[in-house]
Image (cartoon, grey):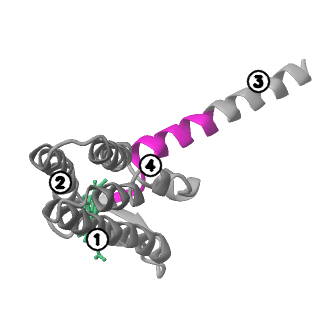
Amino acid sequence: MKSSKLAMAAIVLWVATVAAFGWFFVRGNTAAGTDDRTAIVLAPQERDLILLEMRGLLIATHDILDGINQNNMQQVAQAARTVGMNSAADVNPVLMSKLPLPFKAQGMGVHHSMDDLAIAAESGQTAPELLKMLTGTLSSCVACHSAWQLKVADSSK
Ligand code: HEC
């Protein structure tokens, strides 16, 4: 029957689309890096957006350390919250599909642990305890930076 063939074709197409999306969601859009890391290939404004987020993480790290140093736990909580899960909520799906799964997982892990740090600062944890948490978070920054590089897609190709 013609219609069942058409239905079959539609199903095959649907499966292929879902599989392709899944493949990208896991692998992202990557290429060999210029050093021994893997490059994630992005449009210029997507790279700018991620680097802006990165500078935000560095500012927050500074403000958290400054807060701990001055025993100002409100500052610690506030700084950590600016880079918590809320800050990652509005990332667009096209960009998300270009980021490999381990990259997304590590990025989300950092946002989560910043929220945990904010809660710890508000609930009276001691400075050494907060420093220990921040050190753990910084290990994720280090691990991610040693694995990935960001590259702008070559539009001349
Ligand atoms: C999920 C992976 C990942 C995590 C986690 C991560 N970074 Fe990054 N960061 C990157 C990548 C990739 C680059 C670009 C590196 C390159 O292209 O050489 C970058 C770049 C940066 C830059 C340079 C920004 C610029 O304008 O050039 C800073 C600063 C930075 N990260 C800070 C941090 C800090 C602080 C943390 C942790 C609190 C952190 N990052 C966590 C992946 C990550």
Whether 28 is among the magenta residues is: yes
Q: Earlier in the sequence, mark 2 or mark 3?
A: 3
- The one nearer the camera, 22 or 106, is 106
Eyeballing the image, is 2 above or below 35? above
Residue at left 63%, top 30%? 15
Between the C-alphas of marks 3 and 4, the distance is 42 Å
Eyeballing the image, is 16 above or below 47? above
Between the C-alphas of marks 2 and 3, the distance is 51 Å
Between the C-alphas of marks 1 and 3, the distance is 54 Å
- Front: mark 1 or 3: 1
Q: Within 10 angstroms of label 4, few (less than 14), some, or many (20 or more) residues?
A: some
Residue 5 location, x and y as percent? 82, 23
Residue at left 21%, top 56%? 141
**Residue bearing the label numbered 2:** 138
- Front: mark 3 or 4: 4
- The one nearer the camera, 134 or 6, is 134
Tell me: 70 left or right of 58.
left
Q: Indicate yes or no: mark 2 CB to ligand 1 under 8 Å.
A: yes
Residue span colored magenta: 16-30
Residue at left 90%, top 17%? 1
Residue type, numbered disc 2 = Leu
